[in-house]
Image (cartoon, grey):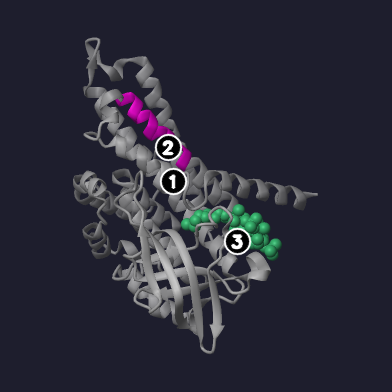
Amino acid sequence: MDYFLTEDQQMIKELAAQIADEKVVPVRAELDEKEEFPWEIMKVLAQSDMFGLFIPEEYGGLGAGALELAIAVEELSRACVGVSTTYAANALGTYPLLLFGSDEQKNKYLPDIASGSRLVAFGLTEANAGSDAAGIQTTATLDGDEWVLNGTKQWITNGGEAEIYTIIAMTDKSKGARGASAFVVEKGTPGFSFGKKEKKMGIRASITSELVFEDCRIPKDNIIGKKGMGFIVAMKTLDHSRTGVGAQGVGVAQGALDEAIKFARERVQFGKPIISIQAVQHMLADMATEVEAARSLVYSVARYVDSGAKDISKVSAMAKLYATDVGMKVTTDAVQVMGGSGYMREYPVEKMMRDAKILQIYEGTNQIQRNVIGQALIKEAASKK
Ligand code: COS
């Protein structure tokens, strides 16, 4: 399908595809096997200005938007979701600064983020606050000219490797969601350390770690936005990042479909390539249709976000929900088309299926996306009365 990309968008797609094919595909199995952080690939992405895509030009970025980011994330995900998670989590961690940061914070952090010289991570989740994001226990208490952070963040992508962390902490526990605030914390700050490094089912090239704050003192000015706005910062950040997770679903599904078609053309059973068997063709036809539908939705939502629309929660949840369910289904079907070969590590679809699973879970489970969509429908219906 022609998605009527501009010349610049087409260039980004081709560049990301080239990096995916030449730099990621040859090493993805090894990165997965060794659970190795993809620093070499991050350096290539930095040299290709990929970290600056969605950062305004005044801060050293390319001034593009959600669609360009989605295109890059999709191409990287076609090769390896572990790599694309590292890249996309950087954007996730940057949104609080981009959307709510002061001029000083933007001037201080965005140029380094745009150049790729410093990676970012977003710290919201805790042991007892996953879907219930307002249930966080980490606290930030003002003491003179400093905030003092205490608590532990769990399952933080890029934790330990990133230099810049955007953290949601409670400044007034009695106020619930309205008692949270957002902060920027730099690696190396005394009282800030890294705990357990997780061992995961998939996306094993990415790193997932605990962040531990023990009387960690940061300057008063490191608050992002106003005190009490932390939950909104987190929700708006997720509204922006979820289109990117949808793009990961599209990419991994496309990668698995490509592999399944290639295999079905070569694999001979009953004296003919299995692609000539109608049962296989029908599976491939469904997979291809679902990939195209998911891509259409993700690109449309990204364009809507780039139009400056304010009410993006519902549609970004839809893009994340639909495209990541497609990612899971198509990778599972690709394993099925390839049979015993698909199940073996020798072929990439086994890893793709493992990687796809996280997309239905992180940045809000797909059940939470349905809640967000459902709440929006209720609000829309009430406003029509
Ligand atoms: N944009 C702006 N404001 C929002 C918002 C959004 N997307 N979502 C909620 N809010 C506001 C609400 O309007 C409400 O404001 P008021 O207090 O003024 O009424 C406030 O925030 C609290 O909202 P709500 O009552 O809906 O909060 P809940 O605690 O019920 O939580 C969900 C809502 C479940 C949607 C939220 O907790 C969530 O997204 N959870 C998943 C978190 C997640 O994605 N975790 C993954 C790890 S982070 S990588």
**Mark 1 and mark 3 residues within 8 Å of each other at the beta carbon:** no
> Which residues are drawn in magenta?
324-338
Tell whether position 86 is magenta: no
**Mark 1 and mark 2 residues within 8 Å of each other at the beta carbon:** yes
Look at label 3 and name its amino acid: Ala
The secondary element bearing badge 2 is classed as helix
Distance between the alpha carbons at the discs numbered 1 and 2: 8 Å
- Find residue 228 and report its image quarter: bottom right
The secondary element bearing badge 3 is classed as helix
Picture quarter with ligand 1:
bottom right
Query: Dot 2 corresponds to which residue?
Result: 328
Would you call the spot at circle 2 few (<14 residues within 10 Å), some (14-19), or many (20 or more)? many
Query: Dot 1 corresponds to which residue?
Result: 359
* Residue 274 visible from this viewpoint: yes
The image position of residue 60, as x and y in percent, is 35, 73
Look at label 2 and name its amino acid: Met
Residue at image point 35% right, 20% down:
280
Q: Which disc is residue 134 wearing? A: 3
Distance between the alpha carbons at the discs numbered 1 and 3: 22 Å
Label whose residue precedes the other's in the sequence (1 or 3): 3
Q: Considering only vertical position in the picture, is 70 above or below 273? A: below
Residue at image point 37% right, 34% down:
331
Nearest to the observer: residue 70 or residue 189:
189
Label whose residue precedes the other's in the sequence (1 or 2): 2
**In the image, farthest residue toward the top:** 270
Mark 3 CB near ligand 1 (8 Å cut): yes
Mostly what secondary structure, the magenta segment?
helix
**In the image, farthest residue toward the right:** 385
